Amino acid sequence: MANYLGLRSKTLFSISLTLLIVAAIASCSTKRNTAISRAYHRTTARFNFYFNAEQAYNAGVEAATTKVKLDYARPLPFILTGLPEAATECGSDMDRSIEKCAALIRLHSITAKPAPKERKLTEKENQFQKQNEFNPWARKAWLLMGKARLWNAEYELSQQALEFTARQFKDSYEGWEAQLWLARLSALNGDTLAATEKMLALDSMATKPSSKYAKFLFAGIYADLLTAMGHYEKAKEYGEIAAQNAQRGNEKTRCRMALAALYEITGNLPQARREFSTVAKKANSYEMSFNAKVKKIAIDAKIKGRGTAKELEKMLHDEKNIDFFDQIYYALGEVTLASGDTSNAMTFFQKAASASTANLMLKGSAFLRIANHHLAQKKYLDAAQFYDSALASLPSSYANYETLFTRGNALGRLGQAAQTIAREDSLQRIAMLPEEQRVKLIDNIIENVKEQERLQQLETEKEQRDRQFAMQNQYRGSGNVNTQSQSGGDWYFYNPATMSFGRSDFKRRWGSRKLEDNWRRKNRHDNFASPNEANPVSPTDSTRETDAKKREFYLQNLPQNDSLLAISNARIIRALRQMGDVYRYDLNAFPEAIERFETLAARFADRDDAPEALYFAYLTAQEGNLTEKMEQLRASILSKYPESSYAHRLIDPNYIQNVQSLSAQLERLHDSALMALNEDRRDEAKLLADQGLALSRDGDFAPQFELLIALATGKTAGSSEQLQALKAFAAKRQGTPQALYAQDVLASMQRLELQGNLHDETPIVESEMDSSSSNTSFKESGGKFWVTAAIPTGGNIQEQKFSILSFCVDWNVNLNLEVFDSPLNDNTTLLTVKTFDDENTAQAFANDLDKAQPIEGVKLTVMPISPDNFNTMVEQKSFSQYLAFYRKKGNSHKE
């Protein structure tokens, strides 16, 4: 009986305990905030979730700290968090940490307030009630998740988590650290002003933590920010604090390496040498130890005032350093530069760039040193080549990359223009040679091409044999490759032997390349050329020879007639002007800019470009405060081109305002004369046009007033007097838009006369400044577009077509544009460019063609036109009516 009662009491106890546990768990919902629920969720969050999240986070940090590739050509970062190069080393660990933090917050975050008490609360209880989060591990999880996302370089997601942490938990440590990481984010995004403001605010907070970790974080982030801003003295102060409070071994040596670099930059060479020497002895990484040793040797050279290259050269004979030859050469360059031997220093930097395959940052830095040297020596074209190579290697995160990119782009345009001039000059010289010499020269070039192809073929065959031999050796020595792999049965990517060989062969040929589009191109960022960029290469169509071993391949590019020579000269003029602009605006190299403008004026003294070029040279001298040169250029413009607008500008400071005032007056006279003509007040129209012609003095308005006078001649429209006046005007102003209009009017009058109703219908009266009447048969449309240009009939149409085609090639060779000619009437021929995808592209082309005017001696009137409207215009045999329709649409047409 006693046993029965004891067993029964145990059973009742077990059931009661089970019920109690079930009741306790049921009361532990995150929607209820009790002492039991808080204890349960805190314990579970800490040991089931946060512990694992923190372990994964620390593993990711350790992986990034030990594996990340550092750029020793610049001061190392004190803090790695958020750097793209670190993100690639810690991704999986950080992903796991983020997953655990998210689960902790979802399952164990307690935001519900505790049940209110009936009695008055103490101050401590009031503070407890005001909390936004009652599980401290959830607060930590929010912060940890923001940091993990920052390590993954997920800036936007990181910012969301950190801003939430800073806002919700602003009075806790987590809130303070979240604000610190937000300052880091601002710095990483390039907003140094916002980052600085946040750091100053955090530094002045009364609740600023005093732990070693907090001191390290704050000082390290601030030191990196100040270094990026170029404030090295202040950065050094915070760098010292970061180095003192860094905890991990790799972290501490990296901070000391970064601090040593700041000591070197600020001129404290003895202290820099001590730090580099310490890092060389204590660094766990051979690479860091090696770089610290190299830096110490370079500083020894600076302290002693002479090169200590023997130690570095000795390193070149150590097989252990074969992967660091690029860094040794770079250090030799710095040592040699410190000794004053600039020439040999540049040679060492060149060797560093050539030896660098895996370290693209050092390769880019070496090229940049050479480029800046040439820039300082004002060897701008040499600098252009090395800037191009530097930008091909440096990442966009490199310090001052935008400035370097802008400068490199300007130098690139300079180099491109210089190449254009050299090419066109060379082609012109060859074209001027007697035919026998020209053919002999081309034959020599062809022989060189054949020889180069032969040598290239031999080199290719040798490489193939070497690869085959190496692969066979690797197969024989590979003990872990299965039989099927050895027999070549596996696909390439399943065969470890071939994969290994392929990888090593690729690195041997190309070095370590970042996986990205256009990896073989130097200028990977510019995939497409601008449509307006001058491109002397002709289109690759069936009419052109593409075989470099045939004479025709070279002869087709030679400017052997006047039209082609004019095109070649136009390219030279554009290139000289571009060089002058780059020197003037981008490089502030005023003497060089003046030299290019003067060269343009001297080579093409009989063209309108000459006085303009001299005037630009004058303005450049003015900007550069070159007083003597200014006076010389002023005298040259006034003596050589006294009637040019540029001479008038130099004589009369108010010339431009006077011209604008006169232009407004002429426009008013023209409008009044046109109105009078349309209202058949012919005498008044002629009087007003005569006044305008007298004021215009054969300027831009003169043809318009002369046209009005011709139209107003005679008592009635269509009279013999008007007919003779229009013919005389068309002959005098041949090739102008006004002459084309006069020819259209004459053609219209001839058609009406044949129909017997010349005096029953009056030809449309319009001018180049007004198109109030237009033919309604023209329709607006979308889709494909052409560009048509009207020229007087009677010229060499083949040369004219070729001039337009050459412009098409220069404009954009990839469009494969074609040029067709078709007669419009007895006096006018249309040159039509086909085909553009839309009206906007056609309009852009028409604007550029109108500015270029590639047919010498002929003024083109250019407009985009749809195929349907083109057919209508040809049927009506009237260019002016479509001109009126086109202008009425509101398209801009520069005359």
Image: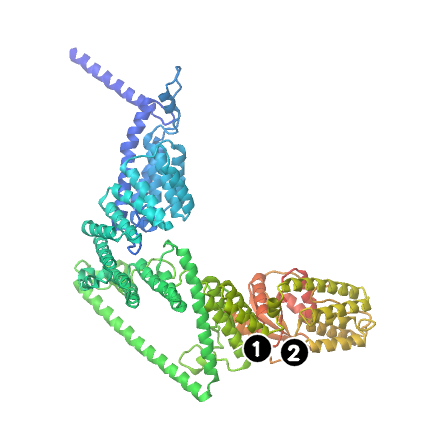
Q: Residues within 10 Å of mark 2 (few under 14, many from 20)?
A: some
**Position of residue 512 measured from the top left corner of the image (x, y, whole percent):** 29, 60
As measured in the structure, the alpha-carbon distance from the residue carrying label 1 to the one carrying label 2 is 27 Å
Say if residue 78 shows up in the picture.
Answer: yes
Q: In the figure, is residue 118 to the left or right of 890? A: left
* Disc 2, SS: loop
Q: Residue at x 66, y 64 (%)?
A: 659
Q: Which mark is residue 606?
A: 1
Q: Point out the tag, 1 or 2, that comes first from the N-terminus.
A: 1
Q: Nearer the viewer, residue 55 or 706?
A: 706
Q: Which mark is residue 793?
A: 2
Q: Where, by quadrant of the figure, is residue 291 drawn?
A: bottom left
**Position of residue 235 measured from the top left corner of the image (x, y, whole percent):** 33, 47
Q: Nearer the viewer, residue 254 or 466?
A: 254
> Foreground mark, 1 or 2?
1
Say if residue 572 shows up in the picture.
Answer: no
Display coloring: rainbow
Q: Residue at x 46, y 88 (%)?
A: 434
**Position of residue 84 measured from the top left corner of the image (x, y, whole percent):** 34, 50
Give amino acid for label 1.
Asp
Give amino acid for label 2.
Thr
Q: Residues within 10 Å of mark 1 (few under 14, many from 20)?
A: few
* Disc 1, SS: loop
Q: Residue at x 37, y 31 (%)?
A: 171
**Quadrant assignment for the C terminus:** bottom right
